[in-house]
Image: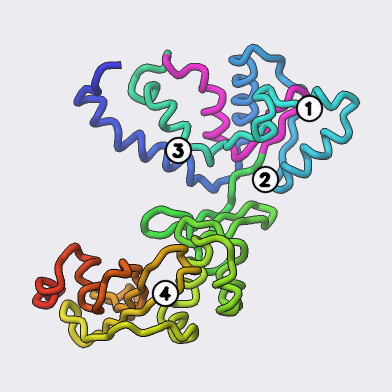
Amino acid sequence: MEALTEEQIAKLPAIRDKWMAIGLNTQPADRAKAEEGVRLAYEIAGLEVPKDFYWVQSPWEGVQKQAELRAGSNDPKKMKSFLGDWWQGLLGGNLWAGWLSWRYAYADLGHPELCKELNGLVKVAENAGWWWAFDEAVILTERASTLKLDPQNRLHSEVGNAIEWPDGEGIPVWHGTQLPATPEEILGWSIEEILAHSNTEVRRCAIEIRGWDNFVKESNFTAVDSADDPGNPAQKLELYDIPRQIFDVDIRVLLCTNGSPERDGRRRRFGLTVPATCKTAVEAAAWTYGLDEKDYAVTRRT
């Protein structure tokens, strides 16, 4: 296609909002419309539509159901997916809104003829969650009933699951990173358990959940430097060496305080990772703003 016209560019915010709404919808599925979308997807693919439609409350129940159907089939080959073996037939429904929005953009911009192969998948996404497409049966999932996000629209919850389905199954997520346990369970981890975890991102999240200030003091990390924060009066900067096992690279952490209060009036103390080449706390603070130490020293946040 040619470059977008001004008229098409003007449509982009509405298209974005439409797909965001689809992806974040936590209302009960419209089962009749979702099944219409499934039938359309099979017809577009030139395949016979299965007679059996099964609805489940969560992806976990869907996995159990497809295993049950496979085990009970007289001919296991009929329980194969028309997609081949990829993810055993799993499709994302409304949680694939990001992928579908990109693939379906031409239709949203006035060229539906270029995207007609996706019409069935889009209709399911507009009306249901995950689903499994097999030769012999279709399994459809209710939408997630809970979706908690941080200000950057990443899945995030400080308590329990960030995404949860009607049957109570869910996934704990911390600022977009999936966790192996809920934040309150991770708070109970020992320093040794945090440092021993094999996943770097999970280690980082566990430290944030505990609080960098607490974690650094409990771990007895080596203090490199401390100073009053010239850019944040009455607040302290502290620079520490961090063991390589936490981030798999040589790095230091700067403990600092928010320049402005949180909504509840508190000033949050947090840690920022900085290069190991930062020799002083002020130099490390300056690095986070893209300044040199001399310029940061005369900078005051307003």
The residues tagged by marks 4 and 3 sit, at their Cα atoms, a distance apart of 37 Å
Residue type at mark 4: give it.
Answer: Ile
- Is residue 302 among what the camera can see? no
Quadrant where the image shows the N terminus: top left
Residue 203: percent from the left, percent from the top? 52, 67
Mark closest to the chain's N terminus, 4 or 2: 2
Dot 3 corresponds to which residue?
A: 98
Assign a secondary structure to mark 4.
strand
Dot 1 corresponds to which residue?
A: 79
Residue 59: percent from the left, percent from the top? 67, 45
Dot 2 corresponds to which residue?
A: 59
Assign a secondary structure to mark 1.
helix
Residue 92: percent from the left, percent from the top? 58, 37
Residue type at mark 1: give it.
Answer: Met
The residues tagged by marks 2 and 1 sit, at their Cα atoms, a distance apart of 18 Å
Q: Is residue 225 left or right of residue 301?
A: right
Residue type at mark 2: give it.
Answer: Pro
Mark closest to the chain's N terminus, 3 or 2: 2
Quadrant where the image shows the C terminus: bottom left
